[in-house]
Image (spheres, grey):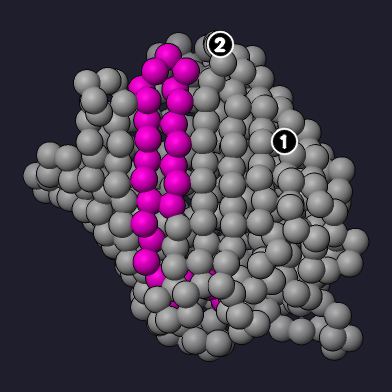
Amino acid sequence: MMTRKLAILLIAVLSAGQSVAGEWDFTGFVGVDTQAFWLDGRYPDQDDYNFSVLLQPEAYWRSDEGHQRISIVGFARGDLQDDERSHADLREAYWGYEGDDWDMTIGINKVFWGVTESRHLVDVINQSDLVEDIDQEDKLGQPMINLNLQRDYGRFELYVLPWFRERTFPGPDGRLRTALPVDDDHAIYESSAEQNHVDLALRYSHYFGDIDIGIHVFEGTSREPRFTVAAEGDRLIPIYEQMTQAGIDVQYTREAWLWKFEAIARQTRNDSFLAAVGGFEYSFYGVRNSAADVGILMELLYDGRDENAPPTAFDNDVFVGARLALNDASDTSILAGFAIDTDSQETFFNLEAERRFGDNVSVELRLRAFANSEPNDAMYTLQRDDYLQLGLSWYY
């Protein structure tokens, strides 16, 4: 049913582009990546590596007068080891119109909210594509009607979200999975409308001198499921509750300093809690008289949810990291950091590096490691899933 609805939306978007003169621009990339795990898996049939082929075709159109636009971005991954990691999605497929002080979008789109580095609490519109990356920064396309008004005193955004996207999870033989595999074919919904529940979101954003601020309210299906064990005791069933969430994100820029803060208050039938993340990034520009910049990051994370809420690993943590941008012709960059739980000393280490070769080839390296987890800790099931990922992409 969801696939048919997405196909209907894509046809409608393509039809809109045929009614007005304009030019199409086609681009995208194809790539391969592999994950190498240097420890044996904790669970049966888990391999020591993953190998995938990726494809992301993109098409963009703008009318001659410049007011209308169409964006279509597809994504597909074929994984040789984990069937659940093989999937396809429309990241974008929308028609947009831009007026003098307003704009609107109808179709499938990705919307990002947030300012902090370690966790994006306020980023609530799109569903996380968890088989792509555990950092929850890869998102599924979200069907929406979006209307924005720009005024001298701020920007107002309204989102009507008619169809819900379920979170993706690794399969039973995939790495980075939970102790019991997740059965996403039998998800439970609090709303009788299930995936057809219409969610609503409002956001206001503006700047006051050196301060950028955003405030939002969301009413609808939680993008984070909690879980219950199936009657057979062999798998987890995701439960998607209705929630009301209010949040704020603030960034203060002062010379080489960036001070960042995000906070939410969320209420569901089973739990109400506050969560926040805040800290700073300080940049050293032109290190040793070069073009390179180095940024030092530190953030504190707090989450007050209890066992009735969706699980999280970041309830009382400190994140420390560094960012290197060489600002060279190859766009070389490195981001490294670790988050440590101040109570249990559970630690997550992350390194990401990117470099372009020529005009069309990009190489990406990722290293993830987990340490000091005990059986009751959130990341205990990942304790043997340290991995190195290498990706190669060709852009056309």
Q: Is residue 194 visible?
A: no
In the image, the segment drawn in magenta is 310-337
Query: Magenta stretch: residue 238 in it?
Result: no
Picture residue at 30% right of the left edge, 41% below the top: 295
Q: Which one is nearer the viewer's eye here, 344 or 311?
A: 344
Q: Position of residue 197 (x, y in %)?
A: 61, 66
**Crowd band around label 1 with a 10 angstrom C-alpha radius: few (<14), some (14–19), many (20+):** some
Amino acid type, mark 1: Asp
45 left or right, relative to 286: right
Q: Is residue 347 visible?
A: yes
Query: Magenta stretch: residue 321 in it?
Result: yes
Picture residue at 67% right of the left edge, 51% below the top: 387
Q: Position of residue 269 (x, y in %)?
A: 52, 87
Amino acid type, mark 2: Gly
Judging by the rendered image, the residue that carries numbered circle 1 is 33
SS label for mark 1: strand
Judging by the rendered image, the residue that carries numbered circle 2 is 358
Is residue 54 placed above or below 39 in the rendered structure? above
Identify the image quadrant of the C terminus: top right
Identify the image quadrant of the N terminus: bottom right
Give the distance between the C-alpha atoms of the residues marked 1 and 2, in whole angstroms: 19 Å
SS label for mark 2: loop
Comes first in the chain, label 1 or label 2: 1
Is residue 180 placed above or below 196 in the rendered structure? below
Which image quarter: residue 377? bottom right
Is residue 28 placed above or below 132 in the rendered structure? above
Picture residue at 61% right of the left edge, 84% below the top: 376
Q: Position of residue 199 (x, y in %)?
A: 52, 63
Q: Label 2 near label 1: C-beta < 8 Å?
A: no
Q: Which one is nearer the viewer's eye here, 321 or 1?
A: 321
341 left or right, relative to 190: left
Q: Position of residue 209 (x, y in %)?
A: 9, 44
